[in-house]
Amino acid sequence: MDQEWIKGTVSLIHRFDGDLMHDELMKIYNNLCEHFGPRHWWPADTPFEMIMGAILTQNVSWRSAAEAIESLKQEGILSIEGILSTDPVSLAALVRSARYHNQKAKKLQSFCGVIAGEFRGDLDEFLSQEMGTLRERLLDIYGIGPETADCIILYAAEQPIFVVDAYTRRIFSRLGYFPEKISYEEMQHFFMSNLPRDVALFNEYHAQIDALGHHTCLKSKPRCGECPVVCQCAVQTELNTQG
Ligand code: SF4
């Protein structure tokens, strides 16, 4: 089965009302959890480390971002003061493994500059703002888009927002819950209007989707034979209908 085939044939879009959609989404979640086990996200020791990681992992694998975090730790500058007091060229060299290193160094310093300048360096105060206010302020910071902002809100501020990404789009369009051409906001609204606003659930659900997208529901050759949600997948339903 190749990607073109999948794109061209998934026409089934599940339409369930309220409680039924909730039950379907929870069934998918439970199947994923049973298959992959708890994911323990986000892999960071502190909220600050989490935020630096969320910026560094933009457009690169987590492994590359983790290497950059490790360099910052070894240099002893994984702190607001540390990042701000390092000259941009040296900072870029330290985060080189995360690629786009000049841009990323600037992004790290922009975020830290806001916390130092507007919140006297108090990250907790920044993160404890009302969710809508926090999201708006995050989106105003250089280099922070919707996905990074939502990761920070969910995993660092521990406030209930559902994070969606390219894996969510690929998997849930193949499963048949929405078309592939859907906006970030529409995808997010789909989950948030059908699931209880629960930080622990949103945390683990996003992490489980990441596991499925990374290991099983691959872009060009999905491993449907080992997929824990194969019974709920529109691709499979269409294959069976055609077969
Ligand atoms: S069965 Fe699983 S791996 Fe295959 S397309 Fe559907 S969600 Fe992806």
Image: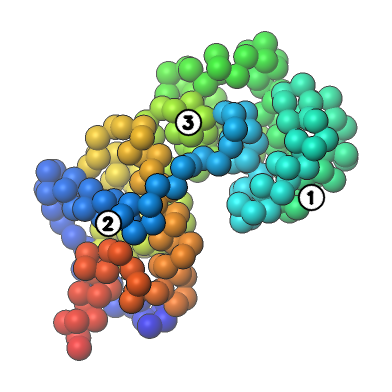
Q: Is residue 4 left or right of residue 231?
A: right
Q: Position of residue 62 (x, y in %)?
A: 61, 52
| Residue hosting label 2 | 31
In the picture shown, does residue 215 fall above or below 184? below
Answer with mark 1 or mark 3, whichever residue precedes in sequence: 1
| Amino acid type, mark 3 | Ile
Circle 1 SS class:
helix
| Amino acid type, mark 2 | Asn
Residues under numbered marks 1 and 3 in contact, where contact means CB atoms less than 8 Å apart: no
**Residue at 33% from the left image edge and 68% from the top image edge:** 227
**Residue at 73% from the left image edge and 42% from the top image edge:** 70
**Residue at 22% from the left image edge and 77% from the top image edge:** 238
Circle 3 SS class:
helix
- Alpha carbons under labels 1 and 3: distance apart: 26 Å
**Residue at 18% from the left image edge and 45% from the top image edge:** 22
Dot 1 alpha-carbon crowd within 10 angstroms: few under 14, some 14 to 19, many 20 or more: many
| Residue hosting label 3 | 153
Q: Is residue 96 left or right of residue 13?
A: right
